[in-house]
Amino acid sequence: MDFFLTIVLDGLIQASWLFIVALGLTLVFGVLKILNIAHGSFYALGAYIAATAVTTVAAHGLPPSVGFVAMLVSVAFIASAVGFLLERGLLKMFYGRDEVVLLLVTYAVFLILEDVTKLIWGVNPIYATQPYELFGNLEFAGLYYVGYDLVLIPISVAAGLAVWFGLNRTVTGKIVLAVIHNEEMSASMGVKVKRVYAIAFAFGVLLAAMAGALTAPKISMQPGLSSDVIILSFAIVVIGGLGSVEGAAVGAILVGLARAASVHLMPQAELFMIYLIMAGVLMFRPEGLFQRETARRI
Amino acid sequence: MKRSLHPVIMIMLVVAAALFGRALPTWTLSLATVAASNALIALGIVVLARTGNVSFGQGLFFAAGGYGVALIANAWGMTDAVAQVIIGAICGGLLGLVIGPLIARYTGIFFGMLTLALSMVLYGALVKSTVLGGSDGFNVGRPTLFGMIFVDPREADFMLYAVSVVTTGLAGIAATILFRSELGLVSLAVRENNLRVEYLGTSANRIVTINFIIAAVFAGAGGAFALMAQRHIDPQFAYWTTSGEFVFVAILAGYQSVAAVFVASLALELVRSFSNLYLPNTWQLVLGIFLLGVILFLPRGIGSLWIRDKHKKNDSAAETPVTAEKGAVS
């Protein structure tokens, strides 16, 4: 039973940060109809910026809690700026083109960011472990967990609820839903569609980078991080249905559990399992688990 | 619409290109070999793209061909280059035969994602398989040709160059014939509107499947070439960025001309080797900017550089009826 519980908890911890990444991906797809390959790069960017922030704070002799706050704040600012500039400066030139072409544009951005991070942070692994000790160790049903890991779960639940609430219960959210539903109609009703695009993309980048920042203390940052993450988050949003918040949540939990289970039971099948689930879901529900016929997507 | 070059002339061009390798310095030979082999795979993507579907997982067939050939070569000592290409093509084709009918129901992004997913399944399996060398892969011997063993590396390079250029050239000719054939034209109709094709009494799925299998065969043969050129194979063959590069070549080429695929593939290899030389560690950056530039300034690919001019001449000479779209442009 303990073994089972370990898998479930590990899976949920995995699912928590994966969900935040996938949420950004699915939001960008919902609004801009772009499947963003560069999304993983924004995750990596967030992780690297967080590492810089954490190590800078630690170098000044300040406590890890300051480092934790500093990393979140710096990532929030830089990521939303990067997202906004990319959308306004680059992506808007390609609107109206085929969705596969847009996919390739983001692939180009992925390639560029991959080398830019290498140029800035080098190719050697970087660590930012100071905040990892922040929440101590917790005992949970006889198992010892690093507090930081468990804190990620409520954070991602809060993020998911906030996005859902923001979309479904606020005026801004309704406007975004209107754009998702029918862009031309909303434009003719006076919605500034361009602005919605820019904000939605910047917010998607922000979510990816935030997930990167939150996981930065847990992992080592090195090249290849972005392509691993994008592959996982693709699987999640495709399982859940592109553009669906609930789908991203279910997809993240499925992928997180599958990863945890295969790590504990069958380490050789990790990537294999996830993509098998994805291929299986697509075989029976081509649109993903939560994609409805109506355009009530996000 | 298409330049109607006679197949015999095309074959002569291919032979001339193969013999031209004699005049090339050694480093260009291996570069041209890689370019020709990548062009073959990109050609498959172009064939498939004519039905409106872009495969982001050609690495699957690329790796299937490569691993299939490598295993057979090591098990039975079968080193003949032509036989290896055929085996690679068969391995890719068989896998395509299994996957094609399943995947033909999907379109657009889902098609791309599903192909990507399947290639990543193979990647995940290969990385963890200790029998196949895991993430390190394994080596194979130097290829031979019709019983000839090439000791001089220059000769071996030329042999590989000649075989790859001839194979890719023949595939290009086959593709040209295919594009003009009934199947090729119906493929375009599927891209325009697959429902209407169904209403007209043909199965759109079947057409996508056939094109998919052709693309798989090409990618499998390409895998055999990559194996022979590197004499080593590893799971990177199936990784999604490998597939991404093939799509890159196809996009660079555009969907209008077979020759453009070769030019695009060569251009990519040149950009890669020069940026490797002068900007080490940043060739992805160069590649990304290059890709953005092409999408922005040559939306219909390199092929549009010479195909469009031809088009205009034809229009004025034959006075083809002006459609609303063309009328708006000119």
Image: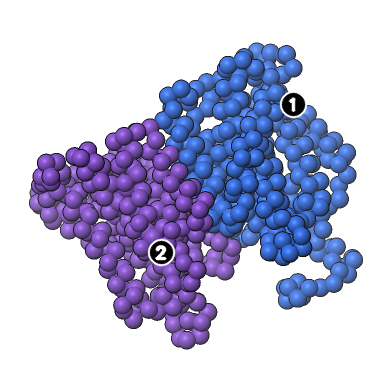
Chain colours: A purple, B blue
Residue B202 placement: quadrant: bottom right
Q: Residue at x 70, y 23 (%)?
A: B83
Q: For the point 70% across and 59% down, which residue is it?
A: B190
Chain for disc number 2: A
Q: What numbered label is drawn on residue B22?
A: 1
Amino acid type indicated by mark 2: Ser
Q: In whole angstroms, how far apart are the C-alphas of marks 2 and 1?
A: 58 Å
Q: Which residue is mark 2?
A: A244
Percent x, y for residue B225? 63, 30
Q: How crowded is the residue under tag 2: few (<14 C-alpha within 10 Å), some, or many (20+)?
A: many
Q: Amino acid at mark 1?
A: Arg
The x, y position of residue B247, in whole percent, is: 59, 48
Give left or right: position of A211 versus A280: left
- Secondary structure beneath dot 2 equals loop
The answer to whether any part of residue A219 appears in the image is yes
Residue A224 image offset from top left, x and y in percent: 39, 42
Q: Position of residue A89 (x, y in %)?
A: 46, 66
Please identify the quarter of the rendering in which residue B35 is found.
top right
Q: Which residue is pictured at 48% across the width and 41% down the height?
A: B120
Q: Is residue A166 left or right of B182 when viewed as pictured?
A: left
Q: Secondary structure at mark 1?
A: helix
User: Along the line of sight, which residue is nearer the eye, B16 or B186?
Assistant: B186
